[in-house]
Image (spheres, rainbow, N blue to C red):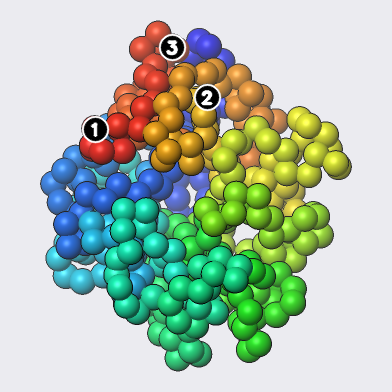
Amino acid sequence: MNAADVNALFAPFKIKSLDLKNRIVMAPMTRTFAPDGVPGADVEAYYRRRAEDGVGLILSEGTVIDRPAASNHERIPFFHGEKSLAGWSKVIKTVHDKGGKMGPQIWHVGSVAHPAGDWPASGVESPSGLLAPETPRGEAMSEEDIADTIAAYARAAADAKRLGFDTFEIHGAHGYLIDQFFWAGTNKRTDRYGGATLKERARFAADVVKAMREAVGPDYPIILRLSQWKQQDYKARLAETPDAMTDWLMPLVEAGVDVLHCSQRRFWEPEFPEIDGEQGLNFAGWAKKLTGAATISVGSVGLSGDFMAAFGGESSSVVGLDNLVRRMEREEFDLIAVGRAILSDPQWVTKVRTGDNENMRPFTAAAFGELV
């Protein structure tokens, strides 16, 4: 693919106060390089290199709110506390100095344990004390726990704006805390945060968004990451129909979300092929169509294998971007997030822009172990 073929990826994009020079987003990817939750000079340099390369929007690795057990690994960064916030302040200053735009991904892992070990040992919380359907782990959150958690999300939002970040993303996907409220299999609550319908179970996420919106005002853009699949069950689906998806997503947009980051393992897979065929709209395409919100798509961009297989040690080879470009040209979604390709190659954007296909790098799982 030559440089002229990728123009759709390099068109500018603006929403509220966020003005991007292209449509490429660095996807949030957990790295565990922050001892005691503090991002250091190596993390700062890692993001600086992506800003230098011209990534349109950098989304940080997941960074956790001020709640006991919001993190499941001792080297995941915090988004609270003087030392951690000072580290993030250096990161965003460096990114801005290099002409980049960036937002932190704000996160609470819920009852999900890290593959590297069961840390922490206590304080684990989730909607109903479940890791997965019929799989207990931790404690069910009280109404006070929920109120305190929502307040912690709001503080993180205020800190993101105060530090100078251009946006933030709320992590509501992949079976973590917010997603555990969405999922009927892990939300058995009988209060206002439970319910038989997806619309009812979206109340916690909507309340989080409302509190974060109040903390940053009307003009600051808010991104929310969502997924049908869970790491606990790759085949899980929250919304089996477009009507169900509307019931799920519209309350979140009405609460204050500007951009829906629609995570799927392979961006080219149709969300409802029974309606529009095997080449039909993907998750981000349907989310945009149903809600009118801007959307980010994601999933195995530029690589042959998906990222969950990579955690199992599988490598991926380089593949072309023709399918992606066609979808971007049709404006099915607004932005495209790229994960492993950018994680392993800080010059990926430049290579795409200039048509330097020969020097595109394949991905190996060894890349998870270093900050390049």
Q: Position of residue 185 (x, y in %)?
A: 64, 69
Question: What residue sits right under mark 1 in the picture?
Answer: 372
Q: Upstream in the sequence, badge 2 or badge 3? A: 2
Q: Please tell me whether mark 2 sits on a helix, a strand or a loop.
A: loop
Disc 2 crowd rating (10 Å Cα; few below 14, some 14-19, many 20+) is some
Res. 164 in view: no
Q: Position of residue 219 (x, y in %)?
A: 48, 63
Q: Which residue is drawn at 39% across and 62% down?
A: 113
> Which quadrant would the C terminus be assigned to in this image?
top left
Q: In this view, does 24 lie above or below 181?
A: above
In this view of the protein, which residue sits in the foreground, 175 or 86?
175
Q: Please tell me whether mark 1 sits on a helix, a strand or a loop.
A: loop
Q: Where is residue 125 in the image (x, y as percent from the top left)?
A: 43, 77
Tell me the distance, in whole angstroms, between the alpha carbons under discs 3 and 1. 20 Å
Q: Please tell me whether mark 3 sits on a helix, a strand or a loop.
A: helix
Q: Residue at x 85, y 41 (%)?
A: 274
The answer to the question of whether label 1 and label 2 lie on touching residues, with beta carbons closer than 8 A, is: no
Tell me the distance, in whole angstroms, between the alpha carbons under discs 1 and 2. 21 Å
The answer to whether residue 173 is left or right of residue 311 is: right
Disc 3 crowd rating (10 Å Cα; few below 14, some 14-19, many 20+) is some
Q: Position of residue 1 (x, y in %)?
A: 53, 11
The answer to whether residue 354 is left or right of residue 336 is: left
Q: In which quarter of the image is residue 112?
A: bottom left
Q: Check residue 354 in the rendering and tell me which mark sits there, or answer none.
A: none
Q: Check residue 357 in the rendering and tell me which mark sits there, or answer none.
A: 3
Residue type indicated by callout 3: Asn
Residue type indicated by callout 2: Ser
Q: Residue at x 49, y 25 (%)?
A: 303
Residue type indicated by callout 1: Val
Question: What residue sits right under mark 2 in the picture?
Answer: 304
Q: In this view, does 31 lie above or below 110?
A: above
